[in-house]
Amino acid sequence: MLQVSQLFIYPIKSLGGIAKPAVEITDTGFKYDRRWMLVDEQNMFLTQRTHPQMVLLYVAESLNGFTVSKYNDAGLSIHIPFLTESEKHITVTVWDDVCDAIEVSDAHNDWFSEMLNIKCKLVYMTDDTRRKVDKRYATHDEITSFSDGYPILMIGQASLDNLNEKLKEALPVNRFRPNIVFTGGHAHIEDELAAFEINALNFLGVKPCSRCVVITINQQTGKGGKEPLTTLAGYRMKNNKIYFGQNVLQQQNGIINIGDEIKIVRQQQSFI
């Protein structure tokens, strides 16, 4: 049996995740997942790929929002409200997409700029913004938040265990920034899940996730290396890209929980 074992949201793109016992599925994916983002002075998104120090900002739930703290110094923190009072709309860029966002506040901009030593702004995606997923993989004009491209990323624990058996030092799942982790099945069975149900909600596995240098960055220290990309390249490479995990589209809104069974509706041939 396949069973949900971990659930994560990442409220601010490229900052730390929050483990959840249950999550609400919305039109853009998990509620509050990547609805905030840091952008530079040209309103281009910031990411660990070029600014690994972003891992040193920790995100936690707090009353009516989230708290972001600097690593090892809870005194250096700032509150991010669920609802911003700002009405300052700006146009931001995420990869090839240009979309509307709200600049949260000057105070937030100043705090993040100081913590990261980068001139930057904190922005929020409102419910009115409709950022569509790649039309080659969309089925019903699905939308996403400030994610790299798809609402949900799913990884099987067996896939991580298989990788860790090949590494000198085992890696935690946070290296791969999944939304759903599940137990059961063989390594990379997520590649084969074309359609499945969780708690009577329908999901589609639409595209294996190609991985970048972010998975080589230690999420506690911000230090990079060669692994696990080097090892994955030996058995998870296709068309000069390295794949680990499955991008998923939700078909209904609702709630899923740790412990829920994943019921396979339709399987497909493994991508690799």
Image (cartoon, helix red, strand yellow):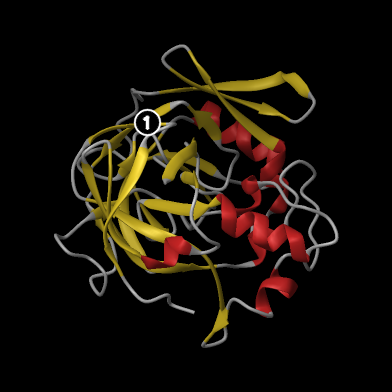
Where residue 52 appears, x then y in whole percent?
71, 52
Farthest top residue in view: 63
Q: Nearer the viewer, residue 45 or 168?
A: 168
Dot 1: few (<14), some (14–19), or many (≥20) neighbours within 10 Å? many
Where residue 116 appears, x then y in whole percent?
69, 42
Q: Which residue has dot 1 on it?
A: 23
4 left or right of 74 in image: left
Taking the image as drawn, is residue 94 in sight?
no
- Note whether 205 is above or below 237 in the view shown: above
Farthest front residue in view: 1
Q: Secondary structure at mark 1?
A: strand
- Note whether 85 is above or below 208 in the view shown: above
252 left or right of 193 in image: left
Identified by mark 1, the residue type is Val
Please name the residue shown 67% across and 78% down the image: 233
Farthest left residue in view: 140
Q: Nearer the viewer, residue 121 or 53?
A: 53
Q: Nearer the viewer, residue 51 or 43?
A: 51
Please name the residue shown 51% across and 88% down the image: 239
6 left or right of 235 in image: left
Farthest right residue in view: 168
Taking the image as drawn, is residue 168 in sight?
yes
Where residue 238 appears, x then y in whole percent?
53, 84
Please name the residue shown 59% across and 76% down the image: 236
Where residue 76 appears, x then y in whole percent?
71, 22
Quarter of the rendering containing residue 65: top left
